[in-house]
Amino acid sequence: MLTNNKNVLTWVEEMVALCKPDKVVWIDGSEEQLSALRDEAVSTGEMERLNQEKLPGCLLHRTNPNDVARVEARTFICSRKEEDAGPTNNWCDPKEMYAKLTPMYDGVMKGRTMYVIPYSMGPIGSPLAKVGVELTDSIYVVLNMDIMTRIGKAAFENLGDTSNDFVRGLHSKADVDPEKRYIVHFPEDNTIWSINSGYGGNVLLGKKCFALRIASYQGKNEGWMAEHMLILGIEAPNGETTYISAAFPSACGKTNLAMLIPPEVYAKQGYKVWTVGDDIAWLKPGADGRLYAINPENGFFGVAPGTNMKSNPNALKTTMKDTIFTNVAHNLDDNTVWWEGLDKNPPENAVEWTGKPWNGKKDEIKGAHPNSRFTAPARNCPCISPEFDNPQGVPISAMVFGGRRAKTAPLVYQSFDWKHGVFVGSTMASETTAAATGAVGVVRRDPMAMLPFCGYHMGDYFKHWLEMGEKLGDKAPKIFNVNWFRTDDEGHFIWPGFGDNMRVLMWIVNRCKGAADAVETPIGYEPKPEDINLEGLDIDLDTVKGLLDVDVDLWKEEAKGIREFYAKFGDRLPKEMADQLDALEARLDK
Ligand code: GTP
Ligand code: SPV
Ligand code: MN
């Protein structure tokens, strides 16, 4: 046991009595212990050790093919009152849910080991950090949590002997039965129960379950924000760094933007980009009244397909050691990994992500699952920010929203003010991706990219955003919206994206400094096309004009869609949001 905290000890005892594991192992975070667990996972076949010369410390894992993504339909927010979960979450009465799940956990770890993982979300000792304890019967979970969070004895230091402020996470793979899969949050009990899955977001309980669903609820009550946002810093040649956070839905480009390599035109002037986080930000007003952000995570759980030396060299380099690959193709020629978009040469002699030999046509059958992932330590990242471990976080100048929209949303626009910015975030829409089970490519509303992650009523969440803006006053970050995904008539992306997205970020930085002009449109402020730097790009001004075009008819349709969506929230939609919608329609009618 690594703690004297009675609340922890009592709860672990209760859960042991329920799950009845053969053995209980406390994870102290020592290399010795973790190394023994890696060996054990390799010896049982749960993981495969990859080529230790080319990929030192790297392992490969395959999940059950029925278990490859988050399962939103089986994810629940069990607040005592149904109305507190709101219309965008699945809800069940907590008593009923505990009664339903308790028999499923009863004896579920017989013949297995229960691992007790203490972890800190956020740098240990940071005033913004929080403690969790995850109980699991999966070594894969232990090894992933080691990369994604700060685990072990040190995590308990923040808690002390008496505090009850820790999140209780209980996970069992059970039989990986999709019909009995549940990802359940009890925000009022600081508790998460997950069963019958072994896939990332469903089982690494520090990530989406705690750091977004539970934390968003805590943030509302405690005056801070938990957001599905990357955090990056742009360092100017004079050494001054501007920090930006950005919310895009799952598999819509956060990791890529967070690690971008400045195009030559900026690199030669001495600009640098630093990664603070690629998925989650916890934000709180600091002593100077500005909004400060930490990344609660300690690693990256990134989408593998599409990652290559051109699109995201920093991510690729980050995965070269001490990384766990999940559901990618296994290259048997040299015992390495491969995925679609890594290069144009799929390995001859390989195993598909399902574990079958990859014999079919390699352009028809995928080697890696579209939601295959790497779990890589932040310390590996060549562009990790020097402020990564700063317990105070970094001051945010701009917040950016965005999604996948083939039409409608322009390349970039700025909100008129904070309130309008909250409206812009609340009306975000994006085409669905493989990060969650269900149809791919369907446009759905995804406010602030938090639709699957907000742990309480989304109307109250908008209200919390409005209140944060009031608190921050004129020190509030400026709010923007971007869209890298507009397509031409043949369905090709028009904007080059990736590193070249910096050209758009630079307009944003300059707007924050009052150093760039803007044009007023019915939806917000836009750059003059010539204010997007195109040096070194194969794109002309007319194309940029097209990307910035606001099609009034499409936007009138959009406004109708927003009105329908807003209707869901009833009287918990803040009046300010309804007023914003009226104002948008009025501007479009002019
Ligand atoms: P989660 O980890 O699921 O939250 O995803 P994410 O938001 O971090 O997305 P990620 O950066 O992993 O990108 C997902 C997919 O979008 C990858 O296949 C990328 O290659 C692709 N992508 C990222 N940025 C761009 C871009 O600027 N343009 C285009 N066309 N594709 C992009
Ligand atoms: C996402 O789906 O937004 C992810 C991956 O970042 S998961 O951890 O599965 O949520
Ligand atoms: Mn994500």
Image: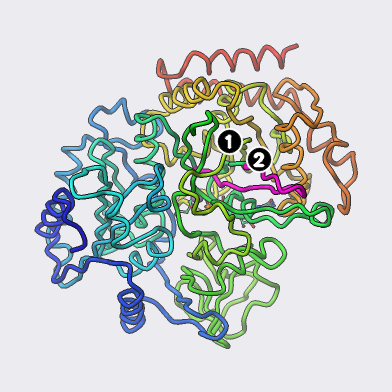
Q: Residue at x 64, y 47 (%)?
A: 233
Q: Amino acid at mark 1?
A: Ala
Looking at the image, residue 219 sits to the left or right of residue 112; the answer is: right
State the predominant SS element of the stretch in magenta. Answer: strand
Residue reaching furthest to the left: 17
Above or below, 156 relative to 310: above
Label 1 Cα neighbours within 10 Å, binned few <14 / some 14-19 / many ≥20 = many
Q: Provide the residue designation for mark 2.
A: 405
Q: Secondary structure at mark 1?
A: strand
Q: State the extent of the magenta-drawn residues as a range.
A: 228-243
Can you tell me whether the CB of the residue at mark 1 lies under 8 Å from the nearest atom of ligand 1?
A: no
Q: Quadrant of the N terminus?
A: bottom left
The answer to whether the residue labelled 2 contacts the one labelled 1, judged by CB atoms less than 8 Å apart, is: yes
Give the class, few, some or many, for how many residues have Cα within 10 Å of label 2's Cα (few <14, many ≥20). Answer: many
Q: Position of residue 425 (x, y in %)?
A: 57, 31
**Of the pair 47 and 257, the residue shown nearer to us:** 257
Name the image quarter holding residue 409.
top right
Can you identify the residue that label 1 sits on? 429
Residue 519, above or below 412: above
Q: Could you tell me residue 189's position as x and y percent? A: 22, 39
Q: Image quadrant for the C terminus?
A: top right
